[in-house]
Image: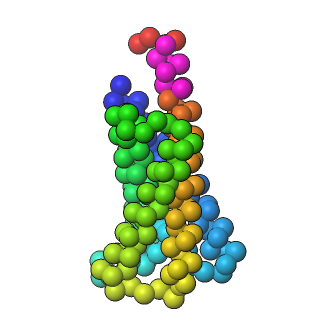
Amino acid sequence: MIFYIIIQLLLVSIVATSAMTWFSYAVSNAFRELYKEPVLLSYAINKMKIDFSAQSKKNWGWLLHYVIGFLFVLGYHIIWAKGMLPISPLSALILGAVSGVIGIFSWIIIFKMTHHQPPIDFKGYYIQLFFAHVIFAITATAMYSITLTILILTKAYVTV
């Protein structure tokens, strides 16, 4: 059963992180600002003086972005499985708002730790980051509901 939950959480996190990333890229392009989390992560890796090639830093930026997305989804799963919040549109908004605040504080810490001051509008970045996390949580909640339903139906009709 654990195997199926891990697959479910991987699928949910990939879809939700991709939706969030798409939103960030769209806002970045619309406002002609660098609001792309994987790119900013690769710049932060660069500032840490880790000896990777430029392409490796880009790849690590993307990988870290998706790993962080998985960790958020894992947190949501624990909250839902323990019954702390129901799987609902309201809980998606609550989780999105909390995740947005966590994301903003995390980026403030990343920028301070790496002494990286990209030439961006920080207020604009943090506003879009908040809404990107709301989109992440809404997508994660919807995908979690769909995959949970599939898991329940599969377990009910398939025996191994």
- Considering the image in quadrants, where does the N terminus appear? top left
Which segment did they paint magenta?
Answer: 149-156
Q: Residue at x 38, y 76 (%)?
A: 108
Relative to 111, 124 lies left or right:
right
Residue 139, compared with residue 154, is above or below; it is below
Q: Residue at x 66, y 67 (%)?
A: 26
**Principal secondary structure, stretch drawn in magenta:** helix
Name the foreground residue: 113 vs 65.
113
Relative to 157, 74 lies left or right:
left
Asked if one can make out residue 45 in the rendered structure from this viewpoint, the answer is no
Q: Position of residue 105 (x, y in %)?
A: 38, 70
Q: In this view, which residue lies farthest toward the right? A: 30
Relative to 111, 143 lies left or right:
right
Residue 38, compared with residue 43, is above or below; it is above
- Considering the image in quadrants, where does the C terminus appear? top left
Asked if one can make out residue 85 in the rendered structure from this viewpoint, the answer is yes
Counting the numbered discs, the total is 0
- Report if residue 142 lies within the magenta region: no
Q: Residue at x 34, y 86 (%)?
A: 115
> Colour scheme in the image?
rainbow
Q: Position of residue 123 (x, y in %)?
A: 52, 80
Q: Residue at x 50, y 73 (%)?
A: 126
Name the foreground residue: 90 vs 20.
90
Image quarter of residue 109: bottom left
Residue 60, compared with residue 5, is above or below; it is below
Q: Position of residue 39 (x, y in %)?
A: 49, 73
